[in-house]
Amino acid sequence: MSRRHYNLPPLTTLSAFEAAARHLSFKNAAEELSVTPGAVSHQIKALEGDLDTVLFQRKHRGVDLTEDGKALYEALSSSFGRISKVLATIRDRTSGGKVTVGSTTAVAALWLSPAVIRFWRDRPEVNVDQLSQDRPFRDRPDVDFFIRYGQDSDPNLSHTPLFRDHLVPVASPELAERLIGASLETLAAERLIHLDSEDRSWTTWPEWFRQLGCNDTIPIESRVNSYSVALQLARKGAGLALGWQRLIQPMLQSGKLVAVGPHHLTAPKQFYLVGRPDEELSDSARALKTWILQEVENVSV
């Protein structure tokens, strides 16, 4: 007699294998599943023993899938995708049309939250949950999509380009007036407010100066781990912050912050809306995604 109706191995072993195969890394799979790499390795060995075949080729750095491993991963990836789509439909129906969108705290405060408020005026029946964090979004099944600077490393996520921003020094009106027409060398000698983020995709002050041809040593005298704090310090005249022009447009228009010209840099990477493919999103999630894309098209900087 079969141990189960479908004669499947335990779901935990299949889940561990799918994550390890998607990342081609036991370590990254362990981070996603909130377990140790040893636990992932144990599950993979149990699955290989159950199937009497080798699923991964262990190498000095990383792993590769064997032919059997590739076949199993393709089947699991497709099946998990279909399950995810059905679950999204059920959640949408039982939660009254709830959508969860993620972003950094700065993107949420400066750009996303105002956009969501305008969306609610048009679609008040859709409940939108915002998840804000200043660290990379790992695999989060509770998030429909999130806004990210640069592409995510997960190839299974859908990437929809939003916009490419421009990076300019910003300061209080008084400091900006003093620095009108300042050279890059003069700016480098000012107190610069550095953002120390776990997400290393963000452009930093040293990278900004280097891209513009200034190779001076950039001292790090003031460091914060929140972009919102960096902007507040700049507003108070404590130094220069690296301004993402489109994100902080309301602060520039109000005069709370002033761009220090003439030096500016087109951001090396684009902002993306990252998440599940459209066919796996609920109707409410697709409606919010469409709204966000329209917001981007209707705003020029």
Image: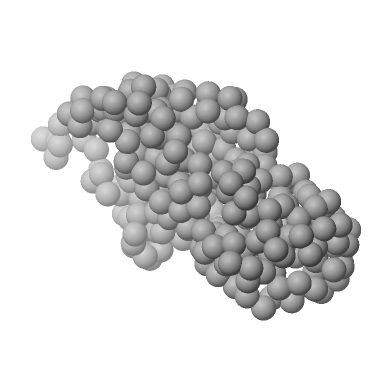
How many numbered marks appear?
0
**Residue that appears at 28% across and 33% down:** 127
Residue drawn 58% across and 46% down? 254
Q: Can residue 248 be seen in this view?
A: no
Determine whether 10 is above or below 214 in the image. above
Q: Is residue 3 left or right of residue 245?
A: left
**Relative to residue 187, is residue 109 depicted above or below?**
above
Please give the name of the residue rendered at 46% of the width and 25% of the height, measured from the top-left corner.
Answer: 291
| Rendered view: 180 above or below 188 | above
Q: Looking at the image, which is closer to me, 277 or 41?
A: 277
Q: Is residue 272 left or right of residue 259?
A: left
Residue ID at (15%, 36%): 4
Residue 123 position by quadrant: top left
- Looking at the image, is 6 positioned above or below residue 148? above
Residue 299, visible in the rendered structure: yes
Residue that extends furthest to the left in the rendered view of this protein: 1
User: Residue 78: where, in percent of width, then height?
Assistant: 40, 29
Which percent across, then down, holds residue 245? 66, 46
> For the N terminus, which image quadrant?
top left
* The C terminus sits in image quarter: top right
Q: Position of residue 31 (x, y in %)?
A: 41, 59
Q: How is the image coloured?
A: one colour
Image-based side of 154 in relation to 269, left or right:
left
- Residue 164 point in image, percent of width and height: 67, 38
